[in-house]
Amino acid sequence: MEQLKTIGRELAMGSQGGGWTGQSKEFLDLVKSIGEARSKAEEDRIILREIESLRRRIAEPDVPRRRMKEYIIRLVYAEMLGHDASFGYIHAVKMTHDDSLSLKRTGYLAVTLFLSDDHDLIILIVNTIQKDLRSDNYLIVCAALTAACKLINEETIPAVLPQVVDLLAHPKEAVRKKAVMALHRFYQRSPASVSHLISNFRKRLCDNDPGVMGATLCPLFDLITADVNSYKDLVISFVSILKQVAERRLPKAYDYHQMAAPFIQIKLLKILALLGSGDKQASGHIYNVLGDIFRKCESSSNIGNAVLYECICCVSSIYPNAKLLDAAAESTSKLIKINPDVAEEHQLAVIDCLEDPDDTLKRKTFELLYKMTKSTNVEVIVDRMIDYMISINDNHYKTEIASRCVELAEQFAPSNQWFIQTMNKVFEHAGDLVNVRVAHNLMRLIAEGFGEDDEGADSQLRSSAVNSYLRILGEPKLPSLFLQVICWVLGEYGTADGKYSASYIIGKLCDVTEAHLCNDTVKAYAISAIMKICAFEIAAGRKVEMLPECQSLIDELSASHSTDLQQRAYELQALLCLHSQAVESVIPLDASCEDIEVDRNLSFLDSFVQQSIEKGARPYIPEIERSGMFSVSNYTSQHQHETSSHTLRFEAYELPKPSPTPAAPQISVSTRTTDLVPVPETTYYTENNQASKLQPVLDASSADHGIKLHLVGVQKKWGRPTYSASSSTTSSSEKKTNGVTHLDGVSLQSQGTLYDSKGQQSEKQKLAASLFGASAGKTEKKPTSTQRAPKANTATAERPGVARAVSPEISKQKAASSPPPDLLDLGEPISTTTPTIDPFEQLEGLIGPTPGPSTLDNSVTTSEQKAPDLMALYTDTPPSSSSSISSGLGDLHSADKNSPMAKNVPSIKKGPNPQDSLQKDATARHVGVTPTGNNPNLFRDLLG
Amino acid sequence: MIRAVIVMNTQGKPRLLKFYEFQPPEKQQELTRSVFAGQGALLSGRPDNVSNFVEADAIFGPVIFSSLLFVSFVAEITKKKKQEEFKEGTRLVYKHLATLYFVFVFDSCENELAMLDLIQVLVETLDRCFKNVCELDIVFNFNKMHTILDEIIFGGQVLETSSERVLKAVEEISRLEKSSSSVSFVPKSVSGRFGR
């Protein structure tokens, strides 16, 4: 139908002497039948038939030239529709030789469309092009230039280059223009062959004809992009051109939508942006004209905006000028200044985009919103983001949105309450996709609260968190990370405000492990939480009645495959039998924020060691001392007994050189074995006296080695470098961070309501208002900066913390109590079977001065149960294997053996009070809700 | 630079294909098709109320970003080099007029808004040339269309932006062709082939 109509129109046009009378009937029929084709297949058939007939007829001898022209056009048409017309190429090439302008142009058009620049037929055309470039008829020259532009390749450039260069001075501006472009094209193809002619571009820049000048900007832009410095001298020319353009000195023909030659302006601005970037002097010339353009630009039309945009780009890339930057900012906000409604319209457009069915549009919008988030609008934006996050299924993008939500919430949260709620939502819907770190941050926030001063607010916050979590637990499916957080918070603060009974919380926690098909980590969190609640109850003097489901949980976990779970279950069982005071010191109430400091010197054991020595035990000799002494004494012959002790000497090949700093654990391992095996006991016994005499010497050296060894050994052995004392500094600065967030949020919250004055505003407008704040556009950069500062502090503060942790060690170094950590390599951290003294009895005695006759029994039994747990918390050695190893090794060095064992008990550094240290240890356990293998960073995250 | 100019109708039939870097016919077809109905139905499936700018990397990549105007301001990278296909930073801008799509494909060196207006220049010129241009004018006179385009874009660079001057140049070409063909004794019917 459409075709019929157009035919009608064609006839009408034809009678007017219009467009298509020139075409032959056949061509019209072809186009018509293609237009009527119902399917692609039909169209293909028609074209193929056409091609067949063309192939036949084009090969006929003596085809009239006008006929040939039409054939060629039909071939072009066929190829445009995707069919191969290569048989006709040669005829197109032949046509370029024709004298007639019309035919020649058609020929050139066809070859430029048909041939690539490496086609075999090119060689046949080069000669024609050469000839035509010298033609008198400028149209022929133009056609040849067009063809040259498309067809001349690297090898043939030299053939036409001289002619093209000559044409740069052609009287016709159309030719000059095209010659410039052709030269540019040659430059793009092969910069080397044209490099000596580049100066021509500079000359053409001063051409009388604005068209030529405009065309020259294209190659110059490319050249300047490649090498800015050699064109700095042109800045003034460009500026003066731009000035003339802006002052409308160019012919009217270049005006476009009331703009003076906008395309040339855009190109010039692009060039100036390149030239001015980072160059103060060059930029100095540009400022003026840029200012002019800013003033003249009207943003009413599309092209006006294009120029304005280019201007802004230019201003931002050249050497900064405050005035221009202001102007740039102003011109972008001009719209809003003129009429706030305009801005509102755009704001609404953004809101519309959020509801657009097009997903990519939404994403872009969220990107935009993410970038413009301030503390005034964070709530709205994050809410929107979470809604969107819930609605999408794409895990990858969900992760991204979730992490952005978290980031924004952490940065701009108006209140902790809100932060926790937001985090809950994020966890609920994308829990398994967010970083573990986020969970730990959340836990920390709940634990630390607002700050030290406001205990009431803290507890309110916690109880609200507990409430919300208890509610959320009703949900059918929760991600495991979120469950971990819930378990931890419930364990820590579930019973804190007395609103919920312990058994209720325990019941809930048991439900967690059952209802949610959760992994071991969650179970571990849950049982730790149960343990904590039980401990709080016991400490408060209340009786804990074991719920049946809890008991069954404990039973189940005791038989678990995971040693970690097993251990926790046993620990819980053990804890239930403990006396309330012991429990309280093991798991004190609300102590998750307390700092745990590790006394690496184990100074609290001093008295114990002293006691042992008094009872006849040998003092501890550090590993290096032993091997070092062994070798050094041989060569220096300090010890006369050395010779008598042994007849067979191994040192010659056994000890290449006593390394002064045997920091690496491997070295110590090897020396140990040599030590243990060949050295007879007598050596040590005789040495005993010597060693005690040599004590001061050893002291000094061990202190020297000790420091290094401690640091290296501790980190490597335990694999959890998180016990470092740096935690205290970190956590305190974190608290500051929270405080800042809070203040910002409160002061800024009210701004979003400014828009409400507008009377009857739709829902969307309100949303827009809350998103964008007042149209005045107050920029709230402050929160970001203040927010960042404490974070930076945290990073730097950590280091002094470490340093501080090291320094007291040196002062407290004592030979007896400073076993180098490589002794742990013996793999005998626990020795419950030590015949001489039971260290756990000792430890138990340290716990408190209270144990009466009744508790003594209790403590003894528990100590035996607890001991492996204590150890296993810090070492991965299963408790069962340790006793056999230790018993096998015998009790030669009871002091030695005790110390590595005791060493595992972290203690406070500040004072030598052993009770404190034990308490700290308890706190460590208390906080370390899940020191499982797959969560090694927990401490670090929790504590800083 | 401008990589390609594609004019096609709303059914996706190409009316004019001009690639400023050589593309074999099959490739041309493929690109045209993907521009018309690429992933996510590029032109054919685009509602009228969305932006005219499309990231053309999408034709070859999995994702299509229909960039909002202000968002598209953000990304401005990549250098052009010799390339076989549209490379990164390639965008296309289109204008939907009556039954035709005018599509310009260009790289990051060009200003998108300016390109949109260059389409306007082209269309204005065509309109003046054919007096109320319609699809059929372009179908039957696509060689003339090529002539006009050659006056505006030359080797991928914007040569002339004033439609008045383009028109003048084209008219002069037609006139000279006519006269030269009459000189070469070609029958009148042939000379009329180029219209005015």
Image (spheres, grey):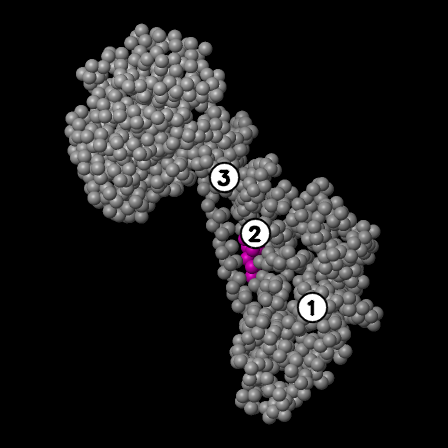
Are circles 1 and 3 on residues that touch, CB within 8 Å? Answer: no
Where in the figure is residue A860, as x and y percent of width and height?
A: 79, 70
Between A897 and B190, the one nearer to me in the picture: B190
Where in the figure is residue B97, as x and y percent of width and height?
A: 40, 20
Where in the figure is residue A230, as x and y percent of width and height?
A: 24, 47
Q: Count neighbours of disc 3 (C-alpha within 10 A) and say few if under 14, some if 14 to 19, many if 20 or more.
A: some
Magenta stretch contains residue A300:
no
Q: Give the mark nearer the N terminus: 2 vs 1.
A: 2
Amino acid identity at mark 1 = Leu
Position above or below: B115 against A512 = above
Position above or below: A699 against A799 = below
| Disc 1 to disc 3, C-alpha distance | 52 Å
Nearer the camera: disc 2 or disc 3: 3
Looking at the rendering, the stretch of residues picked out in magenta corresponds to A729-738
Q: What is the chain letter for disc 1?
A: A
Position above or below: A608 against B139 = below
Between A43 and A168, the one nearer to me in the picture: A43
The secondary structure that most of the magenta stretch takes on is: helix
Q: Which residue appears at 59% of the width and 41% of the height?
A: A395
Q: Which residue is mark 2?
A: A738
Amino acid identity at mark 2 = Asn
Where in the figure is residue A184, as x and y percent of width and height?
A: 26, 37
Amino acid identity at mark 3 = Glu
Q: Which residue appears at 50% of the width and 36% of the height?
A: B62
Q: Give the mark nearer the N terminus: 1 vs 3.
A: 3
Q: What is the chain letter for disc 3?
A: A
Q: What is the chain letter for disc 2?
A: A
Q: Count neighbours of disc 2 (C-alpha within 10 A) and say few if under 14, some if 14 to 19, many if 20 or more.
A: many
